[in-house]
């Protein structure tokens, strides 16, 4: 989350397992963070937009605060501090039925040092007497709100406090922001690329699979365009997805495909033909999102002796022929190879999404294309394509083609039309949707 934000930011901080993610979900009134009974489940800082009494604000959930045991834990603590610094208001969460600990005091001190308004949320108040909440005044935070997420106690009062504290922070409309999802199987280098693109430590990077378990977000600006990067959890094939935490993580990653405008699919250079990668590419295409294929960890593969670069790329292209419109580029977050070019690539794909072809040009193209190769059909049911228009309310290039007996058009002819359309108009990095409308049956509509 950058300083150039458009709405006030509320950060939730506290030691591990005090109920921060449950509070996050309760305030959002939907399941967004991963909530389990395992301490330390939230490893990355995640955020979402919330609203109360017509006032919008960004809600940020952070990993549990604890004394850093290693470099990995230290990076988590750094993210908590970063979220606190960038927030307009800080919620410090403690457990009502557990005496204030040294970790609680450390969190409170960090929050108070920020100079921002701080609210002490004494959670799980249903497990003890309500007056117990005010025993936590010794932490030095004057505004105290008892809550119980499980019993839905004190949540509206907490939201009232949040809104009253951010009342002087101007809320502006969210700008036109391009959303980019980083996708792939576990441990293919998504978070490393995320960090390389940000040129700072924002996601967690560790030599272990499955580090990113929520969708981690950050906003950057490139050539005047705000770009939101979504670093997702690795998507395994169904048979290998563990129940519980990882299951929710995969669902979050799949939801990111729908949320994104463009997806960057990272493919491990050491295993470029994995069926799961191809399945993810198909999901992106079916969702109607822009797509680029990134061969990651190229710094390792490119060092092999007698490595046939052209043969390798030819094989990968063949494996992903069903999304042949998606650009293929080799990358390395370690060496930085082609990382700086990705923003250019993203912008090019985005511009192609916006192409509007005048109707007369489309119909001139249709006449030429059909004359060159008419569609086949059944006896007495010969398809005739009469005219076409581009849909104006679709985020990707989408076209309606009107005619008669269009239901008998073979899928190979539809592919022919799409290829010819791409030859004439540059829809780089984007799927194309063709809708065939039978004039004899206005209700009949079939999607390519």
Image (cartoon, grey):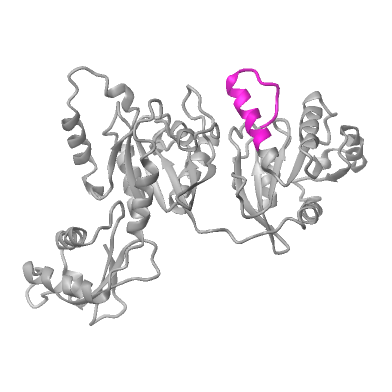
Query: Residue 186 at x, y = what percent?
Result: 42, 32
**Residue 207 shows up from this direction:** yes
Between residues 209 and 224, which one lies in front from this camera angle?
224
Total count of labels: 0
Q: Please provide percent x and percent y for residue 164.
A: 80, 56
Q: Main secondary structure of the magenta part?
A: helix
Question: What residue is rendered at 67% in x and 42% in y?
Answer: 86
Where is residue 369? Give x, y as percent: 12, 68
Q: Residue at x 39, y 47 (%)?
A: 263
Tell me where residue 108 sits by quadrant.
top right
Residue in front for this viewpoint, 69 or 300: 300
> What is the span of residues highlighted in magenta in the rendered image?
64-82
Magenta stretch contains residue 67: yes
**228 in the magenta segment:** no
Q: Residue furthest bottom?
A: 440
Residue 244: tell me if it is visible. no
**Quarter in which the N terminus is drawn:** top right
Question: What residue appears at the point 61 percent right and 35 percent down from the top-left corner?
Answer: 42
* Horizontal relation, residue 282 to residue 93: left or right: left
Residue 184 is left or right of residue 306, and the answer is right
- Residue 30 x %, y %: 62, 52
Q: Residue drawn 67% across and 45% down?
A: 24
Query: Which residue occupies the foreground of this view, 441 or 219?
Result: 219
Q: Is 324 left or right of 131, judged from the image as shown?
A: left
Q: Quadrant of residue 160?
A: bottom right
Q: Residue pushed farthest front?
A: 223
The quadrant in which the C terminus is found is bottom left
């Amino acid at each position: 989350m950058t300083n150039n934000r458009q709405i006030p930011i509320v950060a939730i901080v506290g030691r591990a397992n005090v109920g921060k993610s449950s509070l996050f979900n309760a305030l959002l009134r939907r399941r967004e963070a991963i909530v389990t009974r395992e301490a330390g489940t939230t490893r990355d800082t995640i955020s979402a937009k919330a609203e109360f009494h017509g006032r919008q604000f960004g809600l940020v959930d952070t990993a549990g605060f604890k004394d850093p045991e290693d470099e990995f834990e230290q990076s988590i603590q750094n993210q908590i501090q970063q979220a606190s610094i960038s927030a307009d208001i800080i919620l410090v969460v403690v457990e009502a039925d557990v005496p204030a600990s040294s970790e609680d005091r450390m969190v409170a001190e960090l929050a108070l040092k920020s100079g921002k308004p701080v609210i002490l949320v004494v959670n799980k108040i249903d497990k003890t007497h309500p007056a117990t909440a005010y025993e936590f005044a010794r932490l030095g935070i004057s505004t105290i709100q008892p809550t119980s997420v499980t019993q839905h106690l004190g949540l509206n009062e907490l939201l009232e406090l949040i809104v009253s504290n951010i009342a002087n922070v101007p809320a502006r409309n969210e700008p036109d922001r391009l959303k980019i999802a980083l996708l792939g199987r576990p441990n293919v280098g998504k978070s490393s690329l995320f960090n390389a693109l940000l040129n700072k430590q924002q996601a967690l990077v560790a030599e272990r699979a499955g580090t990113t378990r929520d969708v981690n977000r950050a906003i950057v600006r490139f050539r005047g365009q705000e770009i939101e990067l979504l670093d997702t959890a690795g998507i395994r094939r169904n048979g290998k997805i563990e129940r519980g935490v990882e299951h929710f993580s995969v669902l979050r990653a799949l939801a990111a495909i729908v949320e994104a405008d463009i997806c960057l699919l990272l493919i491990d250079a050491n295993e470029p033909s994995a069926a799961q990668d191809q399945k993810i590419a198909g999901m992106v295409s079916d969702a109607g999102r822009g797509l680029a294929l990134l061969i990651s960890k190229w710094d390792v593969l490119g060092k092999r002796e007698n490595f046939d670069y052209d043969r390798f790329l030819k094989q990968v292209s063949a494996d992903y022929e069903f999304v042949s419109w998606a650009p293929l580029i080799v990358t390395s977050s370690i060496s930085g190879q082609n990382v700086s070019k990705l923003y250019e690539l993203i912008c090019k794909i985005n511009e192609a999404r916006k192409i509007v072809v005048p109707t007369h040009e489309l119909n001139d193209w249709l006449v030429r294309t059909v004359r060159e190769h008419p569609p086949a059909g059944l006896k007495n049911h010969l398809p005739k394509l009469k005219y076409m228009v581009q849909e104006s309310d679709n985020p990707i290039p989408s076209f309606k083609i009107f005619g008669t007996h269009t239901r008998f058009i073979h899928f190979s002819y539809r592919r022919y039309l799409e290829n010819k359309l791409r030859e004439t108009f540059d829809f780089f990095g984007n799927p194309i949707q063709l809708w065939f409308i039978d004039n004899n049956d206005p209700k009949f509509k079939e999607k390519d």
